Amino acid sequence: MQTVAKFLIIRFSSIGDIVLTTPVIRCLKKQVPEAEVHFLTKDSFRSIVEHNPYIDKLHVWAHSRELMVHELNEENYDYIIDLHHNVKTLKLKIKTKLKIIIFSFKIFKKIGLFAFGILTKRKLNDSKIWQVCIIAPLIALFLDMLSNPAWYEAKLHISLGLHNISKSIFNGYIIGNELILINGILTFAGLWIISKPGENKVLVQA
C-alpha cells in the first residue's frame, strides 16, 4: 500500500523528554494510519524508542552531520516534526531538503513560561508542569487546524469534517504567526491553574 505521507520526528534527548513524545507518535499514526513515521534521536537513547510499534524506522545520530544529512535526504520526507528545536536541529533542517516544518514544542511554550516567571509570584505544582507544556501546544494546534482545515486536509490527505465549525467560529479568518502568542497565553493560563499563591518566607532571629 502506498503511504500517504512520510514524517520525520526529531527528539535527541533526554530520557524523560523522549518518553513524552510517545503520545505524539501514537496520535500521528492513528490519525494517519497509512503514513510512514520515522524517528531521529541520539544513539545513546535508541533503546527508549526502538521497540515503539508506531515507529516505522529509527534513525540514530551516531556519526558526522554530513553522513546524517545524506541519510535523511535519501528518505525524501514530506514533513518534519521538530520536538527538540535547538541550534543542532536548525542546522540539520537547513542542510537537508526537508520540505515542511510542522511543529515545535519549545518555541511555543517558552513565552508562557517566561511571562509566568516574570509576572507572578505564584507557587507551581512541579509534578503538573509537563502536562501544561504538552496540552497547551496541542490545543493551539487544534485551533490552527480549526481555523484552516482545508490546508491540513490537503497536506494529510484526510477529511477532518471541520469546515462548518470553522466557518461558524472563525468566519474565514486564518490564524498565522499569532499562534505563538495564543499558545503562550494557554501555557500561562495552565500554569496559573496548577499554581497557588506563594508564601513569603519570614526570617526569625533569636
Image: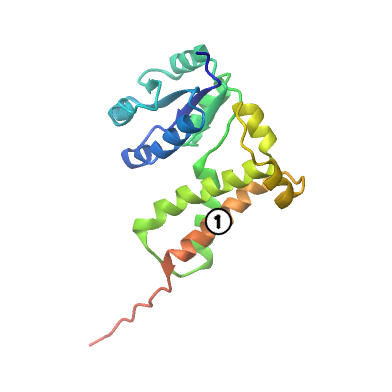
Residue 22 appears at what percent x and percent y?
38, 37
Residue 83 appears at what percent x and percent y?
47, 36
* Vertical side of 22 occupied by 154: above or below: above
Quadrant in the picture for residue 97: top right
Q: In the drawing, does residue 44 fall left or right of residue 128? A: left
Label 1 Cα neighbours within 10 Å, binned few <14 / some 14-19 / many ≥20: many
Residue 52 appears at what percent x and percent y?
33, 28
Q: Is residue 203 visible?
A: yes
Q: In the drawing, does residue 141 fall left or right of residue 86? A: right
Give amino acid for label 1.
Leu
- Residue found at x 64% / y 44%: 146
Residue in the foreground of this view, choosing between 174 and 111: 174
Residue projecting furthest to the right: 172
- Residue found at x 55% / y 21%: 5
* Vertical side of 25 occupied by 95: above or below: above
Residue projecting furthest to the left: 206
Residue in the foreground of this view, choosing between 116 and 57: 57
Q: Is residue 175 visible?
A: no
Task: Please give the residue where the numbered disc 1 appears in the rendered image.
Answer: 186
Residue in the foreground of this view, choosing between 166 and 85: 166
Q: Secondary structure at mark 1?
A: helix
